[in-house]
């Protein structure tokens, strides 16, 4: 009988395992679904700067692709990756750039994964001829609820939201050697309204061409419907008079017992003491008013239109750089 040696059997077994593994990999790649990546470019102006907004969509006939997508500029001698971002649950991503002057050829590149094959969009030509000289520009988008693109409409007690974009110019980020932190704030509101940003400080990294975002919440206030009862306790007025009246009578006696030539000055002193006593025990005293009438109800945010200024400011410890934009808050 012809017997195979244990070494030959081991080699044959390893070869079979490798073959099965290779076939499995080929089968997995064959099952990866194809994708289609589309790119839509739109230009806008903000603060004298030309901004380029890109909307990317990666699709498949049967399922929604996941993973990341990059924006690539093919206008130069070699492709340059401007930014990358993960796809959301709908297979979409968005970018905003302040590109250099000149012609650009932008495309979206989907990297793919084990389930989906990579794909690249058709190039979108973009020409910039009015790029600003600023370090960055701030803009507001997605005002909700709104009646127009630049108006946030609320009723007292209601809150609204918006997205704040801080977009660095391509020239600016190319000169950075360290991260830059930018603080976002707002002004122009009524005292009975406020805005909050998350995060309040955003970071721009060297060679980071895409905009960074912050979420804004605008809060207004409704009038309170209840007020606290007065804090007055019976007997407080009697106690006050028990302390103040003897002193007033004593000063009066001193005045009447003095010499005639100082009588007038003593009488003036008595009148002053009487006035202080009266003010301390009447509604002219804030404490008296609080104890007998209670605190006033909180008013609502006044109706009207407010021009709200959103400012983004950075500082290197020596020089501060600030840029701003505006939108309208309408309180009905």
Image (tube, grey):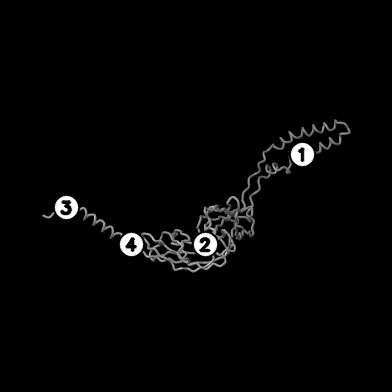
Left or right, 95 with respect to 311, comes to left
- According to the picture, the residue beneath numbered tag 1 turns out to be 276
Q: Is residue 230 above or below residue 174?
A: above
Could you tell me residue 296's position as x and y percent? Answer: 66, 48
Left or right, 64 with respect to 285, comes to left
- According to the picture, the residue beneath numbered tag 3 turns out to be 5
State if disc 2 and disc 3 touch (CB < 8 Å).
Answer: no
Give the distance between the C-alpha atoms of the residues marked 4 and 3, in whole angstroms: 37 Å
- Looking at the image, how many numbered discs can be counted on the residues? 4
Secondary structure, mark 2, is: strand
- According to the picture, the residue beneath numbered tag 4 turns out to be 29
Could you tell me residue 224's position as x and y percent? Answer: 61, 51
Q: Earlier in the sequence, mark 4 or mark 2?
A: 4
Give the distance between the C-alpha atoms of the residues marked 1 and 4, in whole angstroms: 94 Å
Mark 3 vs mark 2: give the one in front.
3
Disc number placed over residue 97 in the picture, else none: 2
Decide: few, some or many residues near mark 4? Use Cα within 10 Å; few <14, some 14-19, many ≥20.
some
State if disc 3 and disc 1 touch (CB < 8 Å).
Answer: no
Give the distance between the C-alpha atoms of the residues marked 3 and 2, in whole angstroms: 68 Å
Secondary structure, mark 4, is: helix
Residue visible at 36% across and 64% down in the picture: 33
Secondary structure, mark 3, is: loop
Q: Earlier in the sequence, mark 2 or mark 1?
A: 2
Q: Quadrant of the N terminus?
A: bottom left
């Amino acid at each position: 009988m012809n017997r195979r040696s244990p070494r030959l059997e081991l080699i044959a077994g390893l070869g079979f395992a490798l073959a099965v593994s290779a076939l499995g990999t080929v089968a997995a790649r064959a099952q990866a679904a194809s994708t289609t990546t589309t790119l839509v470019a739109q230009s806008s102006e903000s603060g004298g700067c030309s901004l380029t907004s890109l909307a990317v969509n990666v699709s498949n006939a049967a399922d929604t692709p996941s993973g990341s997508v990059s924006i690539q500029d093919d206008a130069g001698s070699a492709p340059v990756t401007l930014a990358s971002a993960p796809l959301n649950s709908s297979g979409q991503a968005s970018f905003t750039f302040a590109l250099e002057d000149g012609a650009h050829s932008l495309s979206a590149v989907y990297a793919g994964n084990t389930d989906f094959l990579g794909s690249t969009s058709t190039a979108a030509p973009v020409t910039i001829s009015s790029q600003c000289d600023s370090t960055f520009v701030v803009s507001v988008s997605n005002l909700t609820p709104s009646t127009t693109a630049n108006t946030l409409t609320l009723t007292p007690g209601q809150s609204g939201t918006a997205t704040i974009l801080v977009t660095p110019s391509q020239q600016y980020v190319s000169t950075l050697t360290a991260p830059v932190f930018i603080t976002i704030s707002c002004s122009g509101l009524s005292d009975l309204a406020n805005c909050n940003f998350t995060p309040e400080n955003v970071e721009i990294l060297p060679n980071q061409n895409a905009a960074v975002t912050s979420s804004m919440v605008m809060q207004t206030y409704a009038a309170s419907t209840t007020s606290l009862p007065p804090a007055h306790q019976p007997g407080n007025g009697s106690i006050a008079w028990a302390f103040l009246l003897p002193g007033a009578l004593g000063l009066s006696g001193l005045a009447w017992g003095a010499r005639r030539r100082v009588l007038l000055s003593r009488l003036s002193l008595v009148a002053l003491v009487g006035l202080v006593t009266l003010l301390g025990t009447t509604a002219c005293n804030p404490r008296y008013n609080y104890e007998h009438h209670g605190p006033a109800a909180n008013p609502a945010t006044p109706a009207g239109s407010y021009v709200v200024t959103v400012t983004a400011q950075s500082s290197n410890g020596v020089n501060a750089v600030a840029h701003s934009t505006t939108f309208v808050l309408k309180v009905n």
